[in-house]
Amino acid sequence: MITRDEAFELLKKYNKDMFHIRHALTVEAVMKWYANELGYADEAEHWGIVGLLHDIDFELYPDEHCLKAPELLRDGGVGDDIIHSVCSHGYGITVGNGVTIEVEPIHEMEKVLFAADELTGLIWAAALMRPSKSTKDMELKSLKKKYKSKGFAVGCSREVIERGADQLGWELDKLLTMTLQAMAATEDLISEEVTAEE
C-alpha cells in the first residue's frame, strides 16, 4: 500500500497549480473525517489517500479525467483498489471526448467521495464570499442559500451532489451538514499544509 507521503509526491508530480493541490488536500481531510464519523476509523488513512489522489489526472488531462488516472497511478505504484475508488468518482459523467465513466462506486467510501468531492468546491467558494473567508462560522442555512442560487459556483454540479446523496441513501441536508462540519473541523490543518507548499 502506498504511503501518504508517497501519494502526496505522486499528486505533485502531475499537479502544480495550488488550486488543485488545495482541493486534493481538502478532499483528503474530508474523507478522513468521514471515515472516523462513519465507523471506519481504522481505514481513515486509506480513505484519505483516495481523496488526495482522486483528481490526479485533472490538471494535465481535463478532457480525459478519470481515464488517464489508472495509468498515472499504476506508474506510481498504486494498487487496483485505490485506482477503482479514484475512477469511481467520475461514474456516469461524460468527459471531453464523449466517453462516459462506467466505474461504479461500490464501497461506502467511494460513495462518500462521489458525493463530497463537488460539494467541497461549492462550500469553499461560499466560504471565500464571507468576511471571515472561513467555513468555521458558516451555518447550514447560509450554505443552502448559496446551493440554491443557480448563478453561484456554476462549475459545481448540483446534479452530481444530489446523485451522490441518493447513492448514500442520505437526505441532501445530511450531506451538506456533514461535509460542512468536516471542512470546518479540518480547515486549519489544510491551510497549514497549503502554506507549507506555497
Image: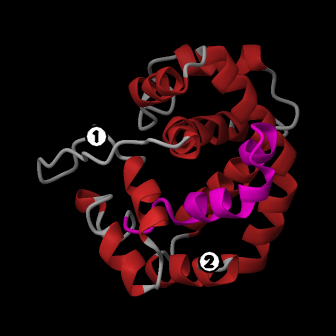
Amino acid carrying mark 1 in the image: Ile
Element marked by disc 2: helix
User: Vertical placement of 14 versus 166: above or below?
Assistant: below
Calculate the distance from the C-alpha at mark 2 to the C-alpha at mark 1: 26 Å
Please tell me which of labels 2 and 1 falls first in the chain.
2
Q: Quadrant of residue 25?
A: bottom right
- 7 on left or right of 104: right
Q: In which quarter of the image is the N terminus?
A: bottom right
SS for dot 1: loop
- Given the current orientation, which residue lies at the most extreme left position? 98
- Point 37% across, 68% down: residue: 57
Q: Is residue 130 visible?
A: no
Magenta stretch holds residue 185: no
What residue range appears in magenta? 33-57
| Percent of width and height locating residue 18 | 59, 68
Quadrant assignment, res 170: top right
Badge 2, how many Cα within 10 Å: few under 14, some, many 20+?
Answer: some
The answer to which of 170 and 186 lies nearer the viewer is 170
Identify residue for label 1. 93
What main secondary structure does the magenta stretch of the protein show? helix
Identify the residue at horizontal 66%, vertical 25% (top origin): 176
Q: Is any part of residue 102 visible from this angle?
A: yes
Place of residue 67 in the rendered image (x, y in percent of width and height, measured from the top left): 26, 62
Which residue is denoted by mark 2 in the rendering?
8
Q: Is residue 86 left or right of residue 6?
A: left
* Residue contact between numbered discs 2 and 1, judged by CB atoms under 8 Å: no
Q: Where is residue 11 in the image (x, y as percent from the top left)?
A: 53, 76
The type of residue carrying mark 2 is Phe
Please state, as top left, top right, bottom left or bottom right, where the C terminus lies in the image: bottom right
